[in-house]
Amino acid sequence: MAGRDRNPFVQNAHKSTREAKKSQEFDLQRRLEDQGNILSADDMAGLYDPKRGLFTTIDGKPRALTVDDLAAFRAAVHDIERRHGQRRGNVPSPDAGGIKPKQVIDLAAPEDRQRASQQIHTVIPVSNRAGVVHIQTNAGKSSDVARHHVHVQFLGYNNAIASSAKNLDAARAMLAGKIKFDCDCGRHTFWYRYIATIGNFNYGRPEDGFPKVRNPNLRGIACKHVIRVMAHISSGGTFNLFAARMIETGRRTLSDKLNIVKVADQQAFIEQAEKLRKGSKRGAEITTTAQRREKREAQPGYQRRKAEQERQRSANERLRQTHSSKVNKPISESALVSALKSAGFGDKAIAAAIAAAKQAQE
């Protein structure tokens, strides 16, 4: 493909892999060097020394961290853990983890969804390995980089490979299931990686440092790059076909070998996604489940069906009241026995049903 015809965000998959790895290494080194400013899991457990003089912005402006703040932080952590199945009441109860793509969109902060809708317009899968997909997105206009790297681990990949369903059907089930994710942007690193870690839907390095300055209230769940990726995953269309090819390749090779997406295929993915976006009524807007339901319920057709259902319900209720002797006529014991026998029930089950019916009539 001629360079002038290629989308500027398309690049060789191996180059993208090197970029992502370099970003991960930089992030880890930075995190280790900043250890002295981190409010760690040990600190949260009660080992924090106030002499360290750490700060928080939980009240909206910087101030020294207090013992009461630590208690508030622990309560916020427990709320996150309960929401994502890692705690039952006050007892830790970790499960396999993961979160569904639609849940990521629903739980995201409104401003992050808005940024994803307005600023992130390019999503390109560049490689996959054993159910982990490396995806590129464009960066925002104010970013100092051109693209960001999102990794998504599909937890249902092995089940999809072994499923008796066709490739596309197995892919759809996998995409609707649980995932873990990671992004190399600062928003995910400093605001959301901690939430993803304690919620057990983090892919990549874990984070035990509480975001005492950036996100002390643990608000939101994902950056704009991840949200746009989740919208692609959950909207079907182009990503369904990509996932179906994933399943097909996995079934054929039965290996965890890295499978790259060629430049021409990346370009084709973008063009098809753009075609579908232009044909969509929502366009690039990313909406929650509740927002889509409200919009659907506001449609005249929905209102007419709802009104007709209500009229039918009222008519049935009037019939039960005015013809109660006919509508609510009790069934005779002989008719009940006959009906149960014809349905294949045994004598003990029939006797129990008759006893229950008599008790209800008393």
Image (cartoon, rainbow, N blue to C red):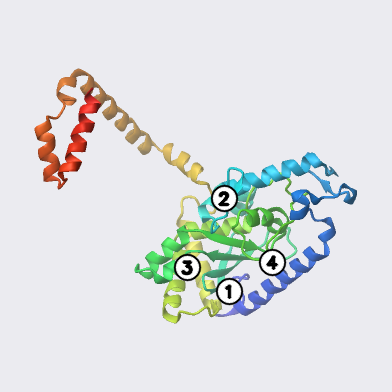
Q: Quadrant of the C terminus?
A: top left
Q: Residues within 10 Å of mark 1 (few under 14, many from 20)?
A: some
Report the front residue among 130 and 275. Answer: 130
**Mark toward the start of the polypeptide (1 vs 4):** 1
The residues bearing labels 2 and 1 have C-alpha atoms spaced at a distance of 41 Å
Q: Given the image, on which type of amino acid does mark 3 rest?
A: Tyr
Q: Given the image, on which type of amino acid does mark 4 rest?
A: Ala
Q: Could you tell me residue 97's position as x and y percent?
A: 55, 57
Q: Could you tell me residue 226's position as x and y percent?
A: 60, 58
- 2 vs 1, front mark: 2
Q: Quadrant of the N terminus?
A: bottom right
Q: Residue under label 3, please give it.
A: 157
Q: Residue under label 4, please give it.
A: 146
Q: Residue under label 1, please give it.
A: 6
Q: SS for tag 3?
A: helix
Q: With respect to residue 60, does 316 lie above or below? A: above
Q: Could you tell me residue 169's position as x and y percent?
A: 38, 64
Q: Residues within 10 Å of mark 4 (few under 14, many from 20)?
A: few
Q: Is residue 223 visible?
A: no
Report the front residue among 89 and 13. Answer: 89
**Mark toward the start of the polypeptide (2 vs 4):** 2
The residues bearing labels 1 and 3 have C-alpha atoms spaced at a distance of 31 Å
Residue 349 in which image quadrant: top left
- 4 vs 3, front mark: 3
Disc number at residue 153?
none
Q: Residue under label 2, please give it.
A: 84
- In the image, what residue occupies the spot 37% across and 34% down? 303
